[in-house]
Amino acid sequence: MMETVHQSLVNQLSEITINKPTDIKLQPQNGEIMVKKGSGRTKIRKGQTDAEYGSQKQQFHMEGPMLNTKTWLEELDVSKIDPNIKSDRAKLESLTERLYFKRDYVKCLETTKFALELFKDLNHKKIKNEIDELEYLKSSCSKKIETVQ
Amino acid sequence: MTKIEPRNPENNPIRIIERCRKEGRPVFIAGPMVRYSKLPFRSLVREYNTDLVYSPMILAREFVRNEFARLSDFTTNNYDTPLIVQVGTNNVTDLLRFVEMIHPFVDGIGINCGCPIKEQIREGIGAALMSEPDLVSDMVYAVKQKYGDKVCIETKIRIHPDLNETVKFVQKVEKAGVDFITVHGRTKTTRSSQPANFEAIKLMNESVSVPVIANGDCFSLNDAYEIVKKTKVDGVMAVRGILDNPALFAGYEKAPWGCIEKFWEYSTSYGLTYRLLQHHLSCMLDGRIPKELYKEMMDIKTLAQLIDFFDNNFILKRSNEEGFGTGIEIPFKTQRALHI
Ligand SMILES: Cc1cc2nc3c(=O)[nH]c(=O)nc-3n(C[C@H](O)[C@H](O)[C@H](O)COP(=O)(O)O)c2cc1C
């Protein structure tokens, strides 16, 4: 889900293309390294200073890795979901899918409607698959609930 | 909020290898797969006699620099053990930083010296390291110097066209302090359709005293025992075989239906991107359901529709239903589906 965000950040990682590798002094203690591009040219992968690393380490130390327990989706605080963040939207969708899978159609319908409302101002063309799935869930849950009643 | 618990020393890969030796059987390992060895799959294979499970390769460079990379590349929980995280790296600094950050959450760390993907090789990662024995030894040594027995470190290698080079390679990393070595019995240019070279794996096993794991062409439990017979190694790693049949090490010839039910349960509770879920299910069901049904499944665009597809065509039990996770054969619902 976060692959696109991640990729764009990765692409921003500074790359300096050079032609004469011998002119460059690397700082390996920072993880700076020279790599070969497909074109045969050489490129330096920028290092990471101790301070930069320190702040990453601290963030990870405080928050730890992403924990996905059996119930984490159902325990989500959906009021904190930011519809503009793809990974946040993905969490809400995974929750609707989980509820549908568990055949909890009432809760699923409620969550689906909440998601559709939350996403209503976004550009639906850009998130077509997400909206299609939510619409599908809404109609399918409604039908299933009607059949039971 | 759930907190992650400290690692159980019994789940250190070296302890597992020792235990299996005592039991007189090989260690069964699910190897690393970019994209596919995610948390739901790792949890699934552990239910079927898999002793040790790898994460996909994670790039150290991104992991230590980028919170988004950490979130997307590594999700876990307290049951995600024994776990070896595999790292793609090309320098000591990134590796040491990666190990410092991740080691409290894993049971071991493996350096990928086998990935043949061009983009990674250009970066000096994966199979590029097979021509850098000094760098690999430096990396292993740096981690062992800093952590000693606290961090178990493995290298997953390929063989060279000249096996003497591989012998020197394994001896060098052994000297640097590596805890065990996995040998994929192919060179970096051998196609996976060519058989793995078990003689070469045997030779590597004879050349070092640390445990060696054999990788390549293990598609059944019987294969695993045959490979051990040929190579005399401590354990066997399956990758393509276990992707198609996560119950391989429990002796099943094909993924039993219960395994598919469990995969659904893990994937929807832990969360898995739809395309990955679809791919896993397609691997487990390929050639076992009628072609048109398979095609229909592959054309489905959303997870919700895939749930309905399964419920319409098969009896897919949920975890609160009796008999969940125990079925063997595919329980088709319709007559049409009976003809493959
Ligand atoms: C889909 C896929 C992804 C893979 N990803 C990785 C990886 O992340 N790291 C690695 O060392 N090898 C990776 N490999 C190679 C396997 O780990 C293994 O060495 C190879 O497939 C041979 O084993 P097998 O014959 O059991 O499949 C991958 C293989 C496949 C098929």
Image (tube, coloured by chain):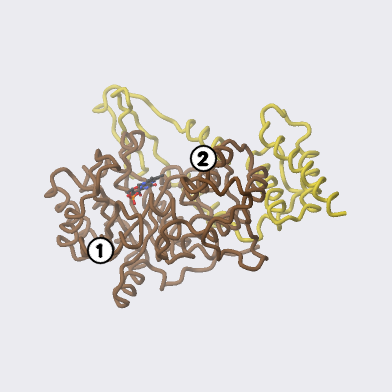
Chain colours: A yellow, B brown
Q: Which residue is mark 2?
A: B291
Residue B218 is situated, as x and y percent measured from the top left of the image, at 32, 55
Q: Residue at x 49, y 31 (%)?
A: A12
Q: Residue at x 50, y 68 (%)?
A: B6
Q: In the picture, residue B30 is in which quadrant?
A: bottom left
Q: In the drawing, does residue B79 fall left or right of residue B30?
A: right
Tag 1 secondary structure: helix
Crowd tier of the residue under label 1, counting other residues whose Cα lies within 10 Å: few below 14, some 14–19, many 20 or above: many
Q: Quadrant of the N terminus of chain B?
A: bottom right
Q: Are marks 1 and 2 on the same chain?
A: yes
Q: What whole-number distance in Å separates the C-alpha atoms at marks 1 and 2?
A: 36 Å
Residue B65 is situated, as x and y percent measured from the top left of the image, at 47, 43
Q: Nearer the viewer, residue A107 or B245?
A: B245
Residue B324 is situated, as x and y percent measured from the top left of the image, at 61, 64
Q: In the drawing, does residue B182 fall left or right of residue B248?
A: left
The correct choice, above or below, for B187 with respect to B167 in the image is: above
- Tell me the chain of label 2: B
Label annotation for residue A28: none
